[in-house]
Image (spheres, rainbow, N blue to C red):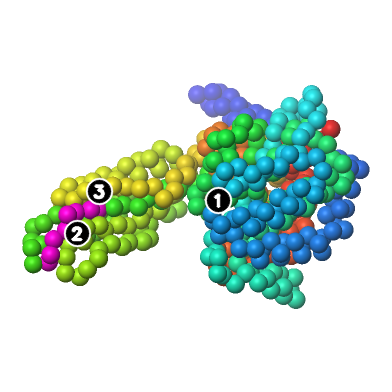
């Protein structure tokens, strides 16, 4: 027994050593890439043009781009892309703007991973069209305006990275496909559309979130509108009649009896009833009462299980009050998997390359098996996908949103080094 135990321990040590070895070879970035003349020239371009870069970032932030109203921002992006030679530019019916920078093809120099690499940056914001978007620049080196962080910083970085690669005549083996997406904030709708209408890329990199983030999973999110309808009746005749309000109230109470994993569980889950409404007059049974449910977890099985339990509560409540129940999805983003399911990603270039690039640039990488960005669409399709950060900043989705100016340059350098490493330099 003890001999077997010893062998087990040895085997474990070997396994750990092997995985460490793989972890070091999984990256397609090496410091030598950072020293190549073409890459050095591209990085120097980002340094030399940073004032213009920041001016464009401010200009872009001040163009309203509420989800589904991205057209003005898209027009600006398209006009700028047209000034960069060698790009194949298109706009799809959803409004996503795509700029393909063709690779040279040919045998892969490094890991054999070279294929089309998608960089996705969402153009939309959550801010209504009449929001004051004037950017305030403070002496502490920060910019303040709604949308300046999420995700205008990424859009500005992507444009500048394309210009830097053009100036330095960088050639990659794999195609680099920059997708400026729409409706990310409405459940990744633009990216879902793009992925459904284009050949599957080898890898997806989304730029979103704070600088240092390396999100390699996908948080599943279901937003449902639960509707209860009844014929209605005047209050005087309402006794024992089908009752939408009572059914909805019962259902909300019952939903909150659905058991969730502990708050500190390795794979948490959460739901919330955030909005409710209905009825037209005080003195009658409402013909329709509705409320919303926001359900989230990274575990696809748990997501389906919790969703069906919640649906069961609504169906039972509808039945006991004699009303009709229907569910409408406001958004349905699937879950990417539990950390153990995604463990192999940790040694894959899609994670190792951003980690090595961040370390090279002196930024601490923060790995996260969750994520709620355009990269989710790739994750759930089984395409190696990751979301990287753009700048330092905070208070996203609020009027006090801010971003640190200097970190925008680091974010751009990071994007450039990751993309040329994943697509492999010629
Ligand atoms: Zn975002």
The answer to whether residue 340 of the structure is visible from this angle is: no
Check contact, mark 3 vs mark 1: CB within 8 A. Answer: no
Q: Disc 3 or 2, which lies upstream in sequence?
A: 2
Marks 3/1: CA–CA distance = 29 Å
Residue 129 part of the magenta-drawn span: no
The mark found on residue 246 in the picture is 2
- In space, the residues marked 2 and 1 are separated at their CA atoms by 35 Å
Rendering coords of residue 300 (x, y %): 44, 39
Q: Residues within 10 Å of mark 1 (few under 14, many from 20)?
A: many
* x, y percent for residue 65: 59, 59
Question: Quadrant of the rendered structure where residue 307 is?
Answer: top left
Q: Position of residue 282 (x, y in %)?
A: 20, 70
As displayed, is residue 325 above or below residue 139?
above
Going 73% across and 30% down the picture, which residue do you hit?
A: 114
Observer-nearest residue: 27 or 150?
150
Residue 184 numbered tag: 1
Q: Earlier in the sequence, mark 2 or mark 1?
A: 1
The residue closer to the viewer here, 268 or 163, is: 163
Mark nearer the viewer, 3 or 2: 3
Mark 2 is surrounded, within 10 Å at the Cα level, by few (under 14), some (14 to 19) or many (20 or more) other residues, namely some
Q: Which residues are magenta?
A: 228-235
Residue at image coords 65%, 57%: 73
Question: Would you say the magenta stretch is mainly helix, strand or loop?
Answer: loop
Quadrant in the picture for the C terminus: top right
Identify the residue shown where x is 77% and y is 65%.
55
Q: Is there CB contact under 8 Å for labels 3 and 2?
A: no
Secondary structure category for the residue under label 2: helix
The residue to which callout 3 is attached is 325
């Amino acid at each position: 027994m003890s001999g077997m135990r010893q062998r087990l321990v040895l085997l474990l040590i070997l396994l750990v050593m092997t995985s460490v070895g793989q972890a070091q070879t999984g990256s397609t970035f090496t410091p030598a890439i950072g020293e190549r003349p073409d890459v050095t020239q591209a990085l120097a371009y980002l340094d030399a043009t940073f004032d213009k870069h920041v001016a464009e970032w401010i200009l872009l932030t001040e163009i309203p781009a509420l989800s589904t109203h991205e057209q003005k921002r898209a027009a600006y992006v398209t006009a700028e892309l047209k000034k960069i030679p060698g790009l194949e530019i298109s706009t799809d019916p959803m409004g996503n703007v795509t700029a393909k920078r063709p690779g040279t093809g040919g045998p892969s120099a490094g890991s054999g991973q070279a294929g089309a690499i998608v960089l996705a940056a969402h153009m939309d914001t959550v801010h209504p069209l009449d929001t004051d978007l004037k950017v305030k620049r403070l002496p502490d080196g920060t910019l303040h305006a709604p949308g300046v962080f999420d995700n205008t910083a990424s859009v500005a970085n992507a444009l500048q990275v394309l210009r830097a690669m053009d100036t330095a005549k960088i050639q990659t083996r794999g195609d680099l496909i920059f997708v400026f997406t729409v409706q990310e904030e409405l459940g990744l709708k633009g990216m879902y559309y793009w992925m459904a209408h284009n050949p599957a890329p080898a890898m997806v990199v989304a730029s979103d979130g704070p600088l240092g983030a390396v999100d390699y999973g996908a948080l599943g999110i279901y937003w449902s509108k639960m509707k209860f309808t009844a014929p209605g009746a005047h209050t005087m005749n309402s006794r024992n009649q089908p009752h939408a309000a009572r059914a909805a109230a019962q259902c909300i109470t019952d939903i909150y009896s659905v058991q969730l994993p502990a708050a500190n569980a390795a794979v948490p889950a959460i739901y919330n009833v955030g909005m409710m409404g209905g009825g037209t007059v005080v003195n009658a049974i409402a013909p329709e009462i509705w409320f919303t449910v926001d359900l989230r977890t990274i575990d696809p099985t748990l997501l389906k299980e919790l969703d069906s339990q919640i649906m069961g509560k609504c169906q039972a409540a509808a039945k006991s009050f004699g009303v009709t129940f229907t569910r409408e999805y406001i958004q349905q983003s699937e879950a990417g998997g539990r950390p153990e399911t995604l463990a192999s990603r940790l040694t894959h270039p899609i994670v190792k390359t951003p980690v090595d690039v961040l370390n090279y640039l002196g930024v601490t990488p923060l790995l996260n098996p969750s994520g709620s960005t355009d990269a989710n669409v790739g994750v759930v399709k089984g395409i190696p996908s990751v979301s990287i950060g753009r700048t330092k900043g905070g208070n996203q989705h609020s009027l006090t949103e801010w971003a640190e100016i200097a970190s925008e340059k680091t974010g751009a350098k990071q994007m450039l080094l990751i993309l040329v490493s994943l697509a492999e330099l010629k």
